[in-house]
Each structure stands twice: as C-alpha cells, then as structure tokens.
Amino acid sequence: MSDMSFEQMLDESFKTIHNGEVLEGKVISVREDYAVLNVGYKADGILTRDEYSNTPVDLTTVISVGDELTVKVLKVNDGDGQVALSYKRLAAEKANERIKEAFENKEVLKAPVVQILKGGLSVDVEGGRVFIPASLVSDVFERNLDKYLDQEIEFVVTEFDPRRRRIIGDRKQLIVAEKEAAKKALFEKIAVGDVVEGVVKSVVDFGAFVDIGGADGLLHISEMSWGRVGNPRKLFKPGDKVTTFIKEINDDKIALSLKFEDTNPWANAREKFAVGVIVTGKVARMTDFGAFVEIEPGVDALLHVSQIARHHVEKPADELKIGQEIEAKIVDFNEDEKKISLSIKALLPEEDETEENTVETVTEDVVEETAESAEETTEAVEDTVEEVSEEMPEETAEENTEEAVEETVEETTADAE
C-alpha cells in the first residue's frame, strides 16, 4: 500500500508544465474578456483577450466552448493558482518565422492594414506585425493614411530584426517597379499621332498632366483648344477623362494635344475669311490698341481702335464692351500667321465723311474772307492815321490812333462771328 496521500497521487496524475512551453488546450468556458482552458494540468489555464490578439475583441465572438487552441505558457502560477496563457505570442513567433522566410527570399507579401500609426502603417502577417513607414507607403507623398485601414496591400520586407522590434516593410518600391514596367510597355507601342485615352492627374498654370496608362503626358495650355485658354483649371480638374492625341515624343516626355485637325477652324479659312467678307462676332477681350473679336470658335480677329468708328476713338472700351456682338468687314487676312483684321468703319456710310469735310471747307472759307476783310480795314485805318497825324499834335494823334484801331478790331470781330 502506497504511503502517498490522495492529493499527492492526484498531483502525480497531472503532467508537469514549464514557463514558455507550448501545449494544447481545450476551451471549457468563455467570457467577453477571458477564456478558461483545460491544459491537462492540475490548474486551469486563463487566456485573456489581451493575450489572444493585439486588436481588442469580444472573445465570445471568436472562441467557442470545445475549441482546441495551441497556446504558450507565460506563467505556471499567475498568483491566483492558475496558468497564464498566450495565444497571440505563439502566433507572432510563427508569423515571425514566416516573415523571416519572406525577407530572406525577397518575397512579396499581401496582408491587411490593421492600424494607422503616427509615422506609417501597421500590417498583420498571420499574427505578426510589420511596420511600413509613411515614406514607403507610396511613390507620392500621402498626407492622409486613413484610407488604407482594413485594406490588403502588397509589400516586401526590407528589414528584419525581431529582437529590436524592427520589422520594416516597403510598398513604394513595388509601385515604382510596376510603373516602370508599364511605362516601358507603353513606349514600345505608342507613336506620334496615336489617339489615347487618359485621366487628368493634376492641373497647373501652364497645362494639365494626363495619365495615359503607364506614363504621364503634358497637355499644354496652348494645345487645349484652337482658341485662347486663359485658365486651364476652368476646363479640367483631377479625375477628368480625356481623349487626346500624341503630338510629340521626346525621350521619356510625351506632349499631348486636343487640337484635332478635323476640328480646325482655320480649315478652308481662305474662303471663309476672305478680304471683303462681312462677319458677326463677339468681343472677347480688349487692349489699348484694339479689341479681339471671336468670329468663330477658335478664331479671333483684331479690330484696331482706328477701325471702330469714323470719329476719333481714344480707347476701345469707350465704344465696346466684352461680350458685345458686332458686325464688321474683313480688311486683311494672313493665313500663315493666322491673323485677321476687321473694320466697323468700313461698313459706315460714306456720307458721314462728306458732311464732315463740307463743314471744314465752309469754315475755312469764312475764316479766309474774314482775314482778308480785316487786312483791308487795317490798311484803311493806317492811311487815316497818317493823315490825322500830320494835322494834330503827336500825343493826341497816338491816343486817337489806338482808339481807332480798337474800334476797328471790335467791328471786324463782330462781322466775322
């Protein structure tokens, strides 16, 4: 008969466990914040939700009674006579082995973003964490990383040092490599004159950059329309889809254009805008020397200030305003330089000029006749003065002479008026 007590015999029936040991446990009870497991030891094991996952979770939604879990022993006695267990640490160790393997083989991993940190993204790889710095998330600066939360992204592990907790991922190099491959493929198949579909990426003062699938092309402000474009932002915004054609390829630079030849307003211009043709247009803009009139979409003609009216015009704004519709005659056409000159004056009646000349002629005749009459009168006065001077004293003669001249001038002026 054994000298061992019942308690001693009971203890002997249970296996011995140690801190750090990995063992199997069966769930016998679950609550929101912890689960109880039978691990074949004299005391039950306790698995808290903090040791189940790095992400706060209601354990009743992920664990059920009867589930078997592989766990790691943290402490054989947690102070309350129970075994402290961890599920996440064992999973992290296994995950680290997986991450290490990917690091050594330069393998591309795909995993969900589980947390947005101050300096980047935290990605979960089978229970292990990989940190992707903000500068390595994309090939462009990302001000707001929130859009990546819960998304699966691809990356490569560029640094693996679990002891220092430095496991770094890089998504940027994959994006750069993918774009380079797409760019190479694009340049191998495109040619000047090709019509391409694209999406506007950004708009600047001098034009818009358009992604045509592998490379960005510049749609310069001068190629946006046959007419004048003042502000590209009034025509395009990021995200707009456009159909353009390739105007020029210079090394890795692509110049795009929307000025398709079949929409060229200067086609057959020699016939449409021949000298002598009367056109209707709207005043588009004005300068000190004249106004530019849109006589057809994409075609502006100059109405010089001297051709606005038959009378003198100081500045175009005195007679015209932006948006005003006018009728004018084409007086000059230069196809090579794409310049057209207009005249409103040429459409005004000739009588206006004749009447003006008549008034000027009559005025000149009156002035000439008056001048002759004044001259004759002056000569007569001078003769009279000479005769009187001989008979009168010198001082009296001078006074009378001055009075006579003044009276003569007044009478002559009255006659002229």
Image (tube, rainbow, N blue to C red):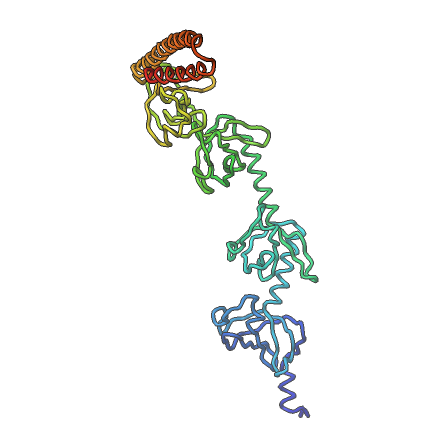
The image position of residue 109, as x and y in percent, is 59, 52
Horizontally, residue 172 falls left or right of residue 296, namely right
> In the picture, residue 122 is in which quadrant?
bottom right
Which of 113/270 is in front? Answer: 270
Eyeballing the image, is 264 above or below 18? above
Give the total of numbered labels. Answer: 0
Whether residue 359 is visible: yes
Q: Quadrant of the N terminus?
A: bottom right
Residue 302 vs residue 27: left or right?
left
Q: Nearer the viewer, residue 34 or 174?
A: 174
Query: 61 or 68: which is nearer to us?
Result: 61
In front: 408, or 48?
408
Q: Using the rendered view, name the quadrant where residue 3 is placed.
A: bottom right
Q: Is residue 359 left or right of residue 4?
A: left
Where is residue 156? Give x, y as percent.
62, 50
Residue sitting at 55 percent across and 72 percent down? 49
Query: Where residue 274 sits in the image (x, y, percent)?
Result: 37, 15
Determine the residue positioned at 64% across, 52% down: 157
User: Residue 67's x, y, as percent?
Assistant: 51, 71
Which quadrant: the C terminus? top left
User: Is 315 situated above or below 11?
Assistant: above
Asked if residue 277 can be seen in this view, the reply is no
* Apparent side of residue 106 relative to residue 322 in the rendered image (left or right): right
